[in-house]
Image (tube, grey):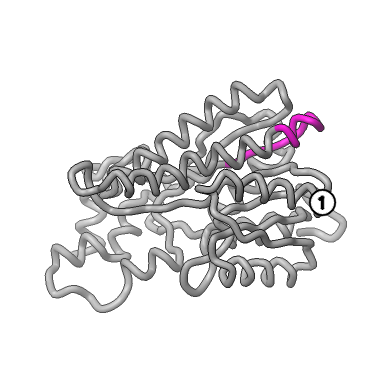
Amino acid sequence: MTAGTPRALENQVAIVTGAGTEGEGVGVGRAIASVLAEQGARLVLTDIDAGRVRETADLVAAKDAKAITVLGDVSSPADCQRVIDEAAEAFGTVDILVNNAAASIPGSVLTLSDADWDTVYSVIVMGAVRMSRAAIPVMAERGHGAIVNISSLASTVSSRSAAYGSAKGALEALTRDMAVQHGRDGIRVNAVVPGYLNTPRVQKHVKGPEPASRQVRVLTSVELRNAVSPLGVEGNAWDVAWAVEYLASDRARFVTGVCLPVDGGVTPTSYLTMAPVIQEELG
């Protein structure tokens, strides 16, 4: 940033759920917190894991940003209200809410139990509902606010988790309804829809020794994840964070009800379109 350039979120109060990172490195929640801090936001970081959210807070502190951590579970209505209350107590208000917390359990309608469905929906859908329900009155009181929900490509294509994919689809529908219902309160509601990302969590599943079977290798390889994108590369957590920063800022003052794909062009592309490129790149 050029010296003297105003920061887009100067002194605004931003809550980021799921702010920790599973594994080493920078996941989506941590990247979002870092980028918002760079833009001048004061941060309320929440996660179910105290160690993970503390690491994010330390990263933010290194950028000379003000931040507090609140240990909490978005599947708990009481925890959600407590996050908003502690944000208001520490900083006086809430300007931005990023609903990033998620849960995923692989399986189909035949293999997922009712408890599995409840777990996934309680975090992804109802977590966003509960956090928004608590934050919107605070935002509406000042006539200004931005909510950004973090969805997934799984809302559009199969993720091998019927619960996760359908929950992300519901989150996008929720985004549109909230945008319409709370626009007159001065609150914009949008979603970022990430595609294939190279994050610490993903690295645990797609990296490591090559499987003996070529079919398994192709289905799990980093090379395939790169090849399916028209850009020929996966995204990362920072790509999502930069999109969140835009949607949360007044630069997007005329943008609401949008589900923005950040996926390298995968959404409008079919496998058949990319098949020749994939075959050439994978051999």
Residue at image point 67% right, 49% down: 82
Percent coordinates x, y for residue 107 in the rendering: 24, 50
Q: Nearer the viewer, residue 142 or 112?
A: 112
Determine whether, in the image, residue 79 is placed left or right of residue 249.
left
Determine whether, in the image, residue 34 is placed left or right of residue 234.
right
Residue at image point 58% right, 53% down: 17
On the image, which quarter does residue 190 sit in?
top right
Q: Is residue 215 above or below residue 164?
A: below
Does the stretch in magenta take in 8?
no
Q: Is residue 137 above or below residue 2?
A: above
Q: Nearer the viewer, residue 45 or 179?
A: 45
What span is in magenta? Answer: 137-148
Percent coordinates x, y for residue 202 in the rendering: 39, 64
Percent coordinates x, y for residue 156 in the rendering: 35, 38
Element carrying mark 1? helix
Task: Please rate how many residues cluster around mark 1, counting C-alpha atoms within 10 Å: few if below 14, some from 14 to 19, many from 20.
Answer: some
Q: Is residue 15 above or below residue 185?
A: below
Residue at the spot of label 1: 91
Residue at image point 53% right, 27% down: 176
User: Which part of the image, by quadrant, shows the C terminus?
Assistant: bottom left
Identify residue type, mark 1: Phe
Q: Nearer the viewer, residue 13 or 63?
A: 13
User: Which part of the image, by quadrant, shows the N terminus?
Assistant: bottom right
Give the residue at the far bottom of this rendering.
209
